[in-house]
Image (cartoon, rainbow, N blue to C red):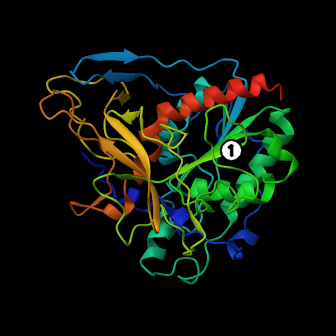
Amino acid sequence: MAFRTLAVVAIAAMALLGGGARAEDAAAAANNYADKADWLCWPGRAGDACDVDLAATVVAGDGAMKVERFKADPHPAIDCFYVYPTVSTDPGVISTMAVELQERRVVEQQFARFASVCRLYAPVYRQFTLTALVARMQGKPLGGAAGAAPPQTGYHDVVDAWNYYLAHENHGRGVVLIGHSQGSGVLTQLIKNEIDGKPAQRLLVSAILMGTSLAVPNGGDVGGDFKTVRLCHASNQLGCVIAYASYRDDSPPPANAFLGRLRTPSGELAAACVNPADLAGGSGELKPYFASRNEAIVAAAAPPTPWVAGKTVTTPFVTLPGMLTAHCVSAPPFTYLAIHVNANPAGPRVKDIPGDVIIGGAVQKNWGLHLIDANLAMGNLVAIVRDEGEAWVAAKR
């Protein structure tokens, strides 16, 4: 029960992204984000990447199934702004602005469900491609020296999209920033440069940065990557950040793991871990939403998952009450979200979850559950944003 697609092996491009512009940036003209074709999701637009069927089958521990229909909020109080992870298989170092299956797939899995609590904005951006990342990891040159810093074109695109949103759509509304992997890396830069300590900070409801290693002081919640944006400790807390990287609790990050650790070791700083199942810091139950046919970030040629023996799931998503719990673990140099599977060996429900990176039939433990960071806690995150939206209204901002 694992995703078997080579593309997923490199979703964590943000772990390798560095600063500094290159020739590609100078050659790339700015996008016109007034053109709605440059947005994956835009409120009220039929047929965009967020206009999808999000119905889920609720599979109980005894195998009973019921369908949970999804309904968007037609008048949400706040907005959500999303930056997707590395999914482009374009041949160059930076992707084109074409909206392809990969971009649509990841939005369906990681962002569209937030339509029940906020207006959805998701720009297309010229990201550092999967093709370039694989070449970089293999030490091969692609569009420049193999060791050169990746271009910052994608970051500049997201800044332009953010500024367009602020100027034309925000009108003082609260906004949640949501990202995964490379998207989280881009949003971390955006918060540092454009929000932290700036006027736009008053609009920040929260930031959800998944599959990343956000630096915070050991035992503290602010002062590493961000000067004034703190970690979240309650669902009614405003202006805070949720960050985590997930691993199975019985398969902790090995020494060569990519996430849950800082690139530059520091005795004073550590990677942040905020548990979406218990923001106060304990253990809690996750409410996952998995693709019912093992289709995650990109399309995968895999047979339907037997979620319940002898039964067929017909909805695009599955959720498994009571199946998963999570807690944060500090095991220097790693800090990570440990996922425990509460399987019933004698029950009819599936005994494990999908999400491992597999190459040549072998699980790549150094990637943990990076592929499904968002799926694992989607129900929890949506509930948190709902509470934050109510807190925003109550604060009369």
**Residue 284 position (above or below residue 321):** below
Q: Pick the quarter of the image with the N terminus.
A: top left
Residue 126 visible in image: no
Point 63% across, 52% down: residue:
97
Q: Amino acid at mark 1?
A: Cys
Residue 129 percent location from the top left of the image: 53, 63
Point 52% across, 77% down: residue:
142
**Residue 234 position (above or below residue 14):** above
Please count the marks in the image: 1
Residue 313 percent location from the top left of the image: 28, 24
Q: Which residue is mark 1?
A: 240
Q: Is residue 370 left or right of residue 239?
A: left
Q: Residue furthest left?
A: 346
Q: Pick the quarter of the image with the C terminus.
A: top right
Kindly state the secondary structure of the residue where label 1 is placed. Answer: strand
Q: Residue furthest front?
A: 219
Residue 28 percent location from the top left of the image: 73, 65
